């Protein structure tokens, strides 16, 4: 199994880098300065206990890949980039190869299944950060990440088992399972707070806001008949991957904070808090707080607002906490 990592950013870079360091055949698909860096000097991967540099073969687009029947594709773009990524894969001749949605949210699997028959989900618990072209940081220790892997919408097959074994040999805690979407919906609950942190900054003062967002989500899940697994720090497995310091590398926060800090012009809030708003509309459950934060995330991205620039009091008034 050759692993093709489409999107060599924070998550994709960490996975591709560790696979290459542990001798597995991997190919990256990257763009611009990131592509030039990893095919030139190589990728620098910073972790709490070690910094390493690794060469990763990479190309600029799927049509530059000599696709093999035994390739496994790890889709590591943000959800807002998934449509373009899938179009590129189809145009390049990908057909039945397994595609693993290594992303936040639950929309990527549905988007992929419209076009391809062999769709898999990965729940990604991997605190990582893109630092600059050719350099990423992975803050998890003693393992860099927890990865639940399975078929979409359910079950698991030989590809899931093989990928789990490969990733487990490359420092991750990876497990093939039949109910991977339960943990993906659990991870979605955690990610609802990404926009809160991005808007207001870190701190326990965010707790009342995220509590409202998650309460709406649980009500929407119940109405939709969605089963969810607790993947928070209350889960004993989280002892295997804890957020740890890397000397000289401050952790900015979640993916939404990182997107705003880079001024990327886009943010995945539509597919995180917006997913809860969608479920609410489909099943008659009010989700005003998630709706408000979905709009706020979009506004911050489009207007180029800096992370942590929205007063918490503004949010509290908007969602009825004052």
Image: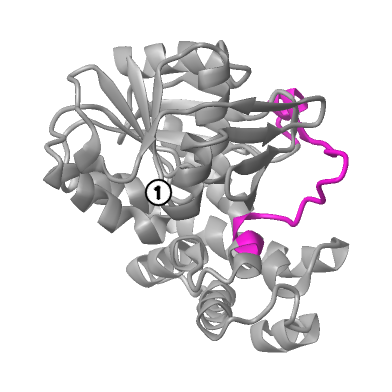
Quadrant containing the N terminus is: top left
Residue at 66% x, 33% y is 45
Label 1, on which residue?
225
Q: Image check: 64 left or right of 229?
A: left
Q: Image check: 130 left or right of 7?
A: right
Residue at 51% x, 36% y is 40
Q: Vertically, is 98 above or below 286?
A: above
Q: Image check: 63 left or right of 184?
A: left
Question: Which class describes the residues within 10 Å of circle 1: few (<14), some (14-19), or many (20+)?
Answer: few
Q: Image check: 255 left or right of 140?
A: left
Q: Vertically, is 259 above or below 289?
A: above
Q: What is the span of residues highlighted in magenta in the rendered image?
A: 234-258
Q: Is residue 194 visible?
A: no
Residue at 65% x, 82% y is 319
Q: How many marks?
A: 1
- The residue nearer to you, when weighing 174 against 300, is 300
């Amino acid at each position: 199994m050759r692993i093709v990592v489409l999107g060599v950013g924070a998550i994709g870079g960490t996975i591709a880098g560790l696979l290459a360091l542990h001798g597995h055949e991997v190919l990256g698909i990257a763009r611009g300065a990131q592509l030039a860096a990893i095919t030139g000097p190589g990728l620098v991967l910073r972790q709490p206990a070690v910094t390493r540099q690794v060469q990763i073969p990479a190309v600029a687009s799927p049509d530059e890949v000599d696709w093999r029947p035994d390739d496994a594709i790890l889709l590591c773009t943000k959800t807002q980039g998934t449509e373009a990524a899938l179009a590129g894969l189809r145009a390049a001749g990908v057909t039945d190869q397994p595609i693993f949605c290594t992303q936040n949210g639950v929309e990527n699997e549905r988007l992929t299944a419209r076009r391809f028959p062999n769709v898999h989900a990965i729940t990604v618990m991997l605190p990582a950060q893109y630092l600059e072209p050719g350099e990423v940081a992975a803050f998890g220790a003693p393992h860099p990440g927890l990865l639940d892997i399975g078929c979409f919408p359910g079950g698991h097959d030989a590809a899931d088992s093989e990928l789990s074994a490969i990733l487990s040999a490359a420092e991750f805690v990876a497990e093939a399972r039949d109910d991977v979407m339960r943990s993906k919906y659990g991870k979605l609950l955690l990610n609802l707070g990404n926009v809160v942190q991005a808007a207001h900054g870190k701190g326990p003062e965010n707790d009342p806001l995220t509590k409202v967002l998650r309460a709406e989500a649980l009500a929407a899940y119940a109405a939709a008949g969605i089963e969810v697994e607790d993947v928070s720090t209350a889960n004993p497995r989280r002892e295997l991957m804890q957020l740890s310091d890397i000397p000289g590398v401050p952790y900015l926060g979640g993916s939404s904070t990182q997107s705003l800090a880079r001024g990327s012009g886009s943010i995945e809030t539509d597919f995180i808090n917006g997913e809860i708003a969608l479920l609410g509309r489909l099943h008659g459950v009010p989700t005003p707080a998630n709706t408000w934060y979905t709009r706020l995330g979009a506004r911050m991205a489009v207007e180029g607002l800096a992370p942590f620039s929205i007063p918490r009091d503004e949010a509290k008034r908007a969602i009825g906490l004052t």
